[in-house]
Structures are given as structure tokens and as C-alpha cells.
Amino acid sequence: MKKGIFLPLVVAVLAAIVYAMIVSSAEKKLNASKNIQNVFVAVRDIKERQVIRRDDVKTQAVPAAYLQKDAFTYSTAADFKAIENAVARIQIPKGNQISKYAITSLSPEAGLSSKIPVQMRGYIINVPTAMAGMIKPDDNVDVLLTFEAMMKTGQRQKVAVTLLQNVKVLGVGGDLGQGLDARTAAAMKSKEEDASAYSDSSALSLSLSPRDAQYLALAQAEGDISVILRSHGDVTNYLMEIATFDKLFNN
């Protein structure tokens, strides 16, 4: 074969191979774009350590080629449970896909601050373990103060006052209301039972205004603090008189 004919033939073959590769790549991309996946994306900017609520995310169809690594995909409504009440590890900008790396479970490791409402404070008190076992996150309690007061008669007497009413419980021990699976719940219960062997009290985390937090701190220094559980839906602040032994025995 003449040299002048061989060289153009080689170039033509190479060109054909390159063209075939380009066409094959384009076909792969086209096929990938046809494979649509539904993913969760942020409806608004989600701040770091923010608890993710259902209205913070929505589902969006994207080609598989554009699916972010470890992104949460959606097939049924139950898939919302995988991210609902989770905590953002990092800031997730509006429109970004929600990935497994970007969130963590709501737990003490994520921090109590993620549950504290804006302009409120998280106040932690110790209550008897038996009482803590009957209280759950998002319950409401009243806070009572028992202390020794000087009466008009000049005698000192124990009195009890309702210091705060309708206080939201953020957490009980390590339970922040995260909706634990059976294995994690059992592990946490075992851990807290081990801790209770060395203490007869458990931590109760309360949501208080800065003003109420100050008064509760002052009350703790003055007397004994106790809590009473309220019925769900009862948000009324009642007018409560000071309880004294005189009133108790004279009724």
C-alpha cells in the first residue's frame, strides 16, 4: 500500500474511533438523564445545628447524573422520617440536596441548644429519677418553690409557691425527643440506668425566658425546687395563693 494512501486511512480510522467514543458518551449521559430520582432539597437556608422540620424540605426530581453523593432519596412519605427532627451538621443552602453527611440525629451529642427556641434559654435542674421517668420531652410542667418564710406573727414557717407555670420540657436526661429506634433507645436506657446507680436524680431541661431563668436560679439558692406535670393542652396560667401550714390545717 502506498504511503500516501495509508496515512489518510489511519487518520480516518482514528477519527471514526473518536467519533464513536463521543457518541457513546453522549448516549450514556442521555440515558443517565432519563433515570430520574426524587431527592430532598432545602426549601430555605438551614442553619448549622438547626433541627430540621418537615416544612424545611421538599422533594425534587433530578437526573441520576446530578444526584449528590449520599443524598436522601424519596419514594414514599415514610422516607421523611429519615431526616425529620435530625440536626444539620453544617449550613445547608436553599435548594441544596440533603445528604447523609450534612445531618446527624437529634441527641446530646448534637447539643441541647438545637432545641431551644429563639430568645429562650435552656435551664437544667435535677429531679428525682422516678419523677423523670414519668416526664417526656415537650411535656409542660409547673415549677414550685418550698422555702422558710418569716410570717406576720414573727414566726418562721415553711411555705410553698408556684413559681413558674406552663414551662416546656426540652429534654429528660439524654432524651431530647428525637424518636429513637429500639436499639438506640435500649442503649440509652441502659446507660442512664448505670448512671442512676450512682445518683438518685436525673437532669430535666426546661425552656425559660432569660427573666424566668434568673428567678429560678434565685429560688434554687433560697429553697427546694420541685416540678409538677400538667395535662396536655392545658396552657392556662392560674392564680395560685401561697400555701402555708396555717391554711392547710384551717381549711
Image (cartoon, helix red, strand yellow):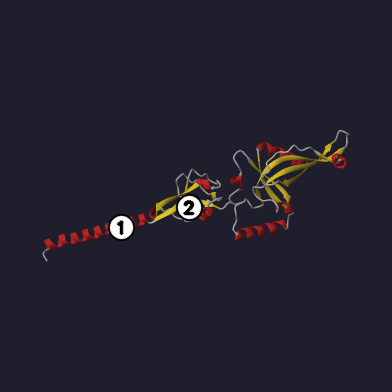
Residue annotated with mark 1: 27
Q: Is residue 102 left or right of residue 179?
A: left
Q: Is residue 244 left or right of residue 51?
A: right
* Relative image position of residue 159 (x, y in whole percent): 82, 40
* Relative image position of residue 214 (x, y in whole percent): 70, 38
* Relative image position of residue 61 (x, y in whole percent): 42, 51
Give the secondary structure at mark 2.
loop
Task: Judge by depth and name the residue closer to the eye, 152 or 110.
Answer: 152
Task: Judge by depth and name the residue closer to the eye, 211 or 199.
Answer: 211
Q: Is residue 82 left or right of residue 23?
A: right
Q: Is residue 77 above or below residue 222?
A: below
Question: Which residue is located at x 60 percent, y 46 percent?
Answer: 115
What is the three-letter code of the residue carrying label 1?
Glu
Q: Bin the neighbour count of mark 1 within 10 Å (Cα to Cα): few under 14, some 14-19, many 20 and up.
A: few
Q: Quadrant of the N terminus?
A: bottom left
Q: Residue furthest bottom?
A: 1
Task: Say which label, 2 or 1, has the lower sequence index.
Answer: 1
Q: Quadrant of residue 234?
A: top right
Q: Which mark is residue 181?
A: none
Question: Which residue is located at x 60 percent, y 56 percent?
Answer: 180
Give the secondary structure at mark 1.
helix
Question: Which residue is located at x 48 percent, y 48 percent?
Answer: 58
Residue annotated with mark 2: 99
Separation of residues labelled 2 and 1 (CA atoms)? 28 Å
What is the three-letter code of the residue carrying label 2?
Ser
Q: Bin the neighbour count of mark 2 within 10 Å (Cα to Cα): few under 14, some 14-19, many 20 and up.
A: some
